[in-house]
Amino acid sequence: MRTTLDPKRTGKDASYLEYRLRQLIAGQDDAIGQIVNMFQMYTTGLSSPGRPIGSFLFLGPTGTGKTRLVEAAAECLLRRPSPVVKIDCAEFQHSHEIAKLIGSPPGYLGHRETHPLLSQEMLNQYWNDDVKLSFVLFDEIEKASDALWNLLLGILDKGVLTLGDNRKVDFSRAMIFMTSNLGAAEMSQIGSPKMGFARSLGKETLAAEEIERRSEKQSKTGVEAARKKFTPEFMNRLDKIVVFKSLADKDLRRILDIELAIFQQRLLAGANQKKFVFAVSDDAKTFLLEQGVDPRYGARHLKRSMERLLVQPLSNLLATEQIEDGDCLRIEFDAIERELTFTKEAEGLPIGTMFEMIDTSVPVQLGALAAAVSNEHPKINTSATASKLKGKV
Ligand SMILES: Nc1ncnc2c1ncn2[C@@H]1O[C@H](COP(=O)(O)OP(=O)(O)O)[C@@H](O)[C@H]1O
Ligand SMILES: [Mg+2]
């Protein structure tokens, strides 16, 4: 018998993870692919024994999704919010602070009170029946002290950490992520491979090859900066080094849609506030994007402009009872005043109807949302109003 096999196809679980991550994360398909591959090695039992399942160094500019991707992957697999053991390396710049991570030896003052952050219980606390995998994130490692480095090297090498009281912590079911902005400044000098919004409005666009060339050069610059700063010992122990790209206009537009969808879902799933739905016109989105562009801060700036121009006014409208439970709003752009306008288009909508109107393609908090809906509205009703308004949202 002779059958050609397809080694590029991934299994059901891995494909599903990839599908979900692509819904949540824009413009970093390469990084997503690396996590998915590693997860599949784990599901098929082919990961190297006696080491963490995978170790990743994420490099690249601020606000391009390095931390978000780790959180999103963990959320997708472990199905609960923020199931990541996160160590902010900036908090461990002095060697004595390491006790917070591993506890102090018996007999030391305060030994009993310390609950080490990296104990086995902390590591395994987010496991569920299907997925026994821990996500450990060392954020901004360029700020770590030597003591933290040594600890990290040990974990990467043997998959074991020894606590202050000599207990061992097993990392062989952990994925280790490290992030760093190292090289980001040099990378941005190459010029964003995909231009920022402000400039693209001036109709300046780049040829595909030029985008590809810059993107490759950015990756190289990032890795070179890391090789200069970090020891070969460390670099050699990493499974993957991934350089995150600066975000293109279309990525930022997608991120805005993702953030709006998350915000809308939160409005409906929230505990005791007034629930309402809103639709944002394309012009209004473009305005938010223009106001939120700053290549130095990636999507962070966009989120701030959304807070300031959209969330804040909505909160005023709620506080002054101009928005009531069951309202449907339309948010548009007034080109003369250069501001967003808020109009009420319908009122008194039942929660089930509102639920049907919103974008649920972004898989965030859907569990909470469904629970909120089924509590108040056991049978979701497809009313005529819903289908009429649906086109607008
Ligand atoms: N590629 C992306 N896809 C989706 N959202 C993103 C992306 N990059 C940034 N964001 C948004 O911006 C916020 C900040 O990004 P973050 O992942 O913390 O950046 P950093 O790369 O500095 O770790 C995230 O919480 C997320 O809302
Ligand atoms: Mg980060």
Image (cartoon, rainbow, N blue to C red):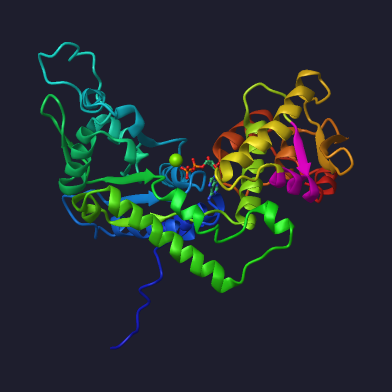
Q: Residue furthest bottom?
A: 1
The N terminus sits in image quarter: bottom left
The magenta region covers: 276-290
Q: Residue furthest top?
A: 109
In the image, what residue occupies the spot 74% across and 46% down? 285
List x then y, in percent, for residue 172: 21, 46
| Residue 378 visible in the current orientation | no
List x then y, in percent, for residue 17: 45, 54
List x then y, in percent, for residue 110: 20, 12
Quadrant housing residue 173: top left
| Residue 255 placement, left or right of 220 | right
| Residue 117 placement, left or right of 355 | left
| Residue 168 visible in the current orientation | yes
Q: Which of the pair 390/104 is nearer the observer?
A: 104
In the image, what residue occupies the spot 72% across and 37% down? 352
List x then y, in percent, for residue 324: 80, 25
Residue 318 counted in the magenta span: no
Q: Which of the pair 96/76 is nearer the observer?
A: 96
In the image, what residue occupies the spot 53% across and 54% down? 246
Quadrant housing residue 94: top left
Q: How many marks?
A: 0
Q: Which of the pair 89/217 is nearer the observer?
A: 217
| Residue 382 placement, left or right of 230 | right
Q: Main secondary structure of the magenta part?
A: helix
In the image, what residue occupies the spot 55% across and 45% down? 296
Q: Which of the pair 145/100 is nearer the observer?
A: 145
Q: Quick check: 118 above or below 246?
A: above
Figure quarter occupied by ligand 2: top left
